[in-house]
Amino acid sequence: MESGIEIFYLKSDQNQEFVFTTYSNGNCSPEKIASDMNGDIICVIQNESSTTWNGKIVSYDISPSLGQIKWAYAGHEDINIVRKFSPSDIVITSAGLVLTVDYYSNIIHVLSTNGVFLTFIGTREGVFSPRSLNIDKERQLQIGSDETEDESAKIYVAKLIS
């Protein structure tokens, strides 16, 4: 079974589709999708098997070459030593930064517009067990957490500085 994205244009009867490149050891699926400043699609691609739950962030070019991979990020060598990169949510800032939750490492990876690792957000900033991300209309980053130091779920709100 193939995975992919099909783009429907609501004002016409045209559509475009492309198939994902699969992992060598199994299927892949787009768990979360966001668009960057150029309208390109950036996906959290997960591969789930009985022994691993890992994934990557993939940026797909939409125009002019639909479905061509612009860049892919599969975690950071210093962060993902013990556990593989397991992205579970993604947002794109107005400046084009890509933020993604790494579920098993309990941190947020911050990537450039080209998918290069810049820094991370985690316990050193007082953010424990991030699970979900959102950017509100005031451009504040909202981070949903299922565990904190006092063992209650929280939503952290941070002002993004561009």
Image: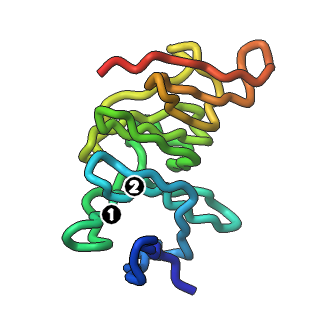
Residue 103, compared with residue 150, is above or below; it is: below
Residue 147, percent across and down? 74, 26
Label disc, if present, on residue 147 of the rendered structure:
none
Q: Among all residues in the image, which is located at the extreme bottom?
A: 1
Q: How many marks can you see?
A: 2
Q: Quadrant of residue 134?
A: top right
Determine which of the numbered discs, if any, sits on residue 60 in the image: 1
Asked if the residue under mark 2 is in contact with the one under mark 1, i.e. CB atoms within 8 Å, the reply is yes
Vertical order, 5 against 120 (above or below): below
User: What residue is disc 2 on?
Assistant: 42
Residue shown at 32%/58% (left/top)? 40
Q: Residue placed at 28% from the left, 38% from the top? A: 112
Label 2 sits on a secondary structure element that is strand
Residue flagged by tag 1: what amino acid is it? Tyr
Location of residue 36 in the rendering, given as x and y in whole percent from the top left corner: 34, 48
CA distance separating discs 1 and 2:
6 Å
- Observer-nearest residue: 147 or 93? 93
Q: Residue at x 40, y 40 (%)?
A: 92
